[in-house]
Every structure is written in structure tokens, then in C-alpha cells.
Image (cartoon, rainbow, N blue to C red):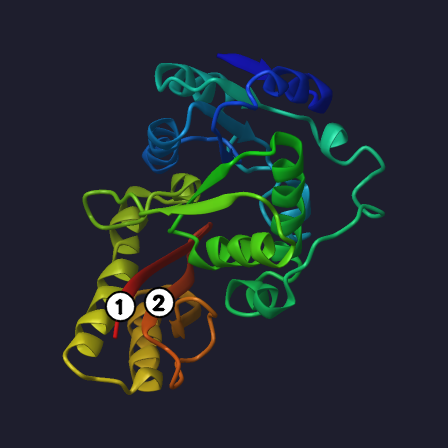
Amino acid sequence: MDTVGDIAGLRTALDVQRHRKIGLVPTMGNLHAGHMALVRECRRACDICVVSIFVNPTQFGPNEDFGSYPRTLAEDLRLLKAAGTDFVFNPSVDTMYPAGQEDHVSVSVPSLAHTLCGEARPGHFDGVATVVAKLFNIVAPHEAFLGEKDWQQLTLIRTMVRQLDMPLWVTGVPTVREASGLAMSSRNNYLSDEERQRAALINRILNGIKTGIERGDHDYEAAEARGRQKLAAAGFDVDYVAVRDAGRLVPPDADTNRLRILAAARLGRARLIDNVGVAL
């Protein structure tokens, strides 16, 4: 496994592999079983597996946790080597933003950047789209692997790739969960033991809404309201519980045949997100 920190060095190393299928798993490090599922899928589907580790400052707001976001590079590299990763791209902030962050070109997906998590975290998805576009340009993968846990992010990246005619496929990998049902996340490290158990309520509520829809309850607004009330009663600071068209993330309409039920809420220091799918 080669660990590379500079763009030219990574491109040079990958140039000799262009006749093979190259896959990319973009991460911010602090790897857990969810990340490793992405790596396994990349290894299965591609000849060359590239994993990026970069805590991207432009997707954090001024009062968010960029400075305290968990960084565990040595352990991450151990896990990736054991999993058969070929290249790790671990650039510095100056490498990714050599002219500074303020004057850097920004990529935005307007139809998806300002709703749901985008409403609660202004500018977040512009930072995500920008850094992922840069990683796609640097690595030039044939396929990229992202987790379904952040469904809005996955949908946004797929939209960016389609609308900017980027020559790659974006594969979503199902969410990996703890035994309680809690979606695995680096931010789960912020939870106390008691909060960690309580956090699993998010998934139970989403699955309850899913069951209701499958049984014929299509009063989505009422289901959303009940979900918010249950989370608030359990001590969560709720950003949203939303039933949306899975592909467009708009409220369901006559063209909708797949739903995604999404939630975001804060518990203690952690902002938690989750979602489940429903076919109509």
C-alpha cells in the first residue's frame, strides 16, 4: 500500500494503472466498519482501490467541529493496509486549497444544497461538492463508492456527476449499523454510553414510518410530525424528519415511485443522520 500526500505523485502512480479499473472511496478518516464496507466493495468491483483521507474544512460551518473532528491516521492506515487498499491519498489543506479557501472555485448543486441538512448547515454541501469534484479530477476513478447513510450527499454527488458529465459511476453502499440499529458514524464517538443507546431511536422511528407507509398510510406530513415529536420527547434537538422522493429529495408527487425517509437530530455533542428507503 502506498500513502501519497501530493497530487502530482498520486497522478504519476495511477498513470501506469489506467488500463485497469480504478475505484475511489472518499473519506475524512477515523474509519469504522461503515467505511470498511465501502473499501471491500471497491476491492470487489475494481482492480485498484484508492482511499482518500482528508478532513475538508470547507464543509464545516464556523461553529462546527472541524478542529475537534476525530483524526486517527495511524489506525486508519493499519485498517486500510489489512483490507488490501492499493493507494491512500492523504493531502494537507494547503495541497487541496493552495490559493486559500476563500478565493477557491466552488461547486454547487442548487437543487439539493439548500434543503434538509443544507438548510441546517449553510454552505456544507458546496464544500462537499467542491472537494469531491477535486478528488474525482485528481484520481480520475472509473467508479466511486459512497455510503447510503448520508443519502442527501450521495444524491447530490450523483447529480453533480451527471450534470457535469464526469466519466465515472457513483455506487451507493448500504448503511452499516450497530447492533442497536444506530447508523455507524465517526460522530458517534461524541456520544456517552447512555446517549448511544438512545440514539438508536432515530432508526426505530424511521422504520415505524416506513411500516405505516407500506400499510397504506400516505399522510406523510402527519407521519413526519409524529416522528419529530417522538424524538423531541426523548431529548433530541430535531432538525427534521422528512418523507421525500428518493431521487429528487422533494416532497412526493405523482411521479414518485421510491421514497426516502430521512432524519437529522442532535443529541449531546453529536449531530446524527439516518434514512430508510420505501418502494411504492
Picture coordinates of residue 3, whole percent (x, y)? 56, 15
Mark 1 residue element: strand
Mark earlier in primary sequence (2, 1) = 2
Residue situated furthest top in the rendering:
1
Is 271 on the left-hand or right-hand side of 274?
right
Residue 244 visible in rendering: yes
Label 2, on which residue? 260
Q: How many marks?
A: 2
Picture coordinates of residue 189, whole percent (x, y)? 40, 39
Instruction: Say which residue appears at 25% left-offset and 75% top-offset.
Output: 280
Q: Which amino acid is tagged 1?
A: Val
Residue 60 visible in rendering: no
Q: Which amino acid is tagged 2?
A: Arg
Instruction: Say which residue appears at 52% left-offset and 63% top-offset.
Output: 117
Callout 2 environment at 10 Å: few (<14), some (14 to 19), or many (20+)?
many
Label 1, on which residue? 278
Callout 1 environment at 10 Å: few (<14), some (14 to 19), or many (20+)?
some
Work out how far the residue at label 2 is from the one at label 1, CA to CA, in angstroms.
6 Å
Closer-to-camera residue (233/43): 43
Mark 2 residue element: strand
Instruction: Say which residue appears at 55% left-offset and 59% top-offset.
Output: 159
Closer-to-camera residue (20/53): 20
Cβ–Cβ below 8 Å for labels 2 and 1? yes
Is 222 on the left-hand or right-hand side of 217?
right
Is 109 on the left-hand or right-hand side of 203?
right
Picture coordinates of residue 173, whole percent (x, y)? 35, 45
Picture coordinates of residue 67, whole percent (x, y)? 62, 38
